[in-house]
Amino acid sequence: MTAAVAYAAAPAAAVPCPETPRASTGARPRTGGGLRVRVPLRIVVGAQYRDAALSVYIKVAALAMRPEGCTAKVSVLAEYLGLSKSVAERGLKDLANPDEADGLVEVVTTRRTLRGGRGQSAHRVVRTATEGEHFVWVPVRAADALTPRLLRLYALIAYAEARNTLLSIGDLGGMLYHHTGKSAGQHLGARQAARLLEELGSTGWITVHARQGLQGRHAYETHRHPIHSTALAPAAAPDIHEGSGADDHAGSLTSREDPRTDRPVTSAGVGGSIRRRRDAGSSAQGHGEKRSNSSGGGTYRGPELQLSPRVWQVLEPVRHELPGISPYVLRRIGQEIGRQLSAGVGAERLTARLTARWVSTEDPRRDVGRWLLGAGLVRRGCRLPSCESGTTWATGERCHLCTNIAHNAALLAAEAAAEQPPAPQPEPPAPARPPTTWLPWPPPPPDPGPEPPGAAEREQLRADATPEAVRQALAELGAPAAIRLYGRALVLPHLTKHHDEGTPA
């Protein structure tokens, strides 16, 4: 059974050795020191957790004490701890995923997204510890000042000191592990533990009293703040314990951060990341380059852009236009010329190409840099390297491949035109319609005759009608007029029997 398992399994009242006086009594009063966080011992001694997991847990637990919880992005957590973002993401991944041993999740993460789909920084809280769970108090300030491995060593010593447990360098080396490389999962060993103890003691967070403990062991005393001022590592110091590869698959994909954090995010970015800017040059003679750099005032202070003599030879036809080109575009022009020169295109050929196109172009002076990249320096012709706009550069003759391509294109066009059906003949125009002749309205009859009797007169006629009068009207006026005068009921009986124009019912 290793010492780590013994520490985690022993009850709080059981002490393996009698109470002994501290060797460092009176070194410095343990007052103040800032906020402390209660860290489960399983995170400190568990080999399944990386060293960075302890640092991330302490920072998340400290920020989670706020009413709204921890809403800082992973990059902000890494900046607080002085780590790279990839190292902080790997440590947070160990805490947010279920443990392989008992399935516990130490940090509960809740993703947040606005109604419109815009991502917010995740909300994180730590797991509530059980009543009989072993723990150790660690100052939050220690997580900001110490590297993850030194912080883990500090937590181990703090737990042993609280339990009054004797420690040896071999015990400390057996509770620290390699997490990367070929030795991943193996113990560090006594020699590496001694080196880490010396480094931790130089920071002032612990006091090491050599050979002053029981049975000749070292006596250790932790402090809630360093007992002497130490220069912290620079913000751009790399983390050599977890590698330098970027890992962007375990963090929170956020587009903005909750503004209610301990301090605003500085423009310098994550403290532990290192990114060197490649020296690509910036301007030709007389060209000063401007770059977006918040730490340097926005002005590029490196060496100016220097073009080679061969590039200047190619750009001789447009040399008087170069001062108006931006340094960035001028650098791209130099790169394009260098690429073609490296491919075997001679400087004389490029100069002749640029001269011919500059003369034949009507007005390229609106944006000379864009014209050079899009038209002036582009090679035109077939796939043969010796072809220059349809002409063989070495001999000046017509390129045979371009000639064949043009001849074949003409044949194909002729065949396509021959295969097409003849165009239909247009139909003759329709004859013009004669103009419409309008007949005049016929004049009214000269003698319209007597007006027809009105309704009152017709009623009187029908009341006084006799069969002889009806038959007389049929004979003189006809059936329609007789019906209009006397009505259908009086006329029909006489019409069917006596009138020749009537129709039998």
Image: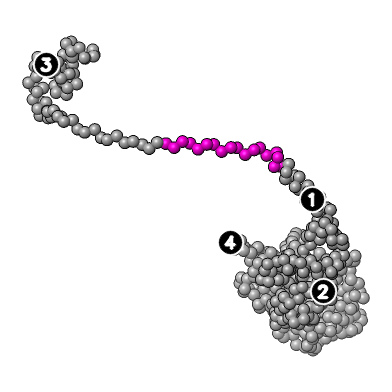
Going from N to C along the chain, the mark reached first, 4 or 2, is: 4
Q: Residue at x 73, y 81 (%)?
A: 288
Q: CA distance from mark 3 to mark 1?
A: 108 Å
Q: Residue at x 69, y 74 (%)?
A: 62
Which corner quadrant of the image does residue 473 belong to? top left
Please name the residue that numbered disc 2 is placed on.
313
Q: CA distance from mark 4 to mark 1?
A: 55 Å
Q: Main secondary structure of the magenta part?
A: loop
Q: Which residue is at the front of the view, 281 or 209?
A: 281
Q: Which residues are magenta?
A: 416-433
In the rendered image, residue 201, in percent from the top left (x then y), is placed at 84, 83
Q: Residue at x 76, y 48 (%)?
A: 409
Is residue 317 toward the left or the right of residue 62 in the image?
Answer: right
SS label for mark 2: helix
In the rendered image, residue 309, in percent from the top left (x then y), is placed at 84, 76
Please name the residue that numbered disc 1 is placed on.
405
Please name the residue that numbered disc 3 is placed on.
472
SS label for mark 4: loop
- Say what amino acid the circle numbered 4 marks: Gly
Q: CA distance from mark 4 to mark 3?
A: 98 Å
Q: Residue at x 9, y 27 (%)?
A: 457
Asked if the residue at tag 2 contacts the one at tag 3, i.e. Cβ–Cβ closer than 8 Å, the answer is no
Front of the two marks 4 and 1: 1
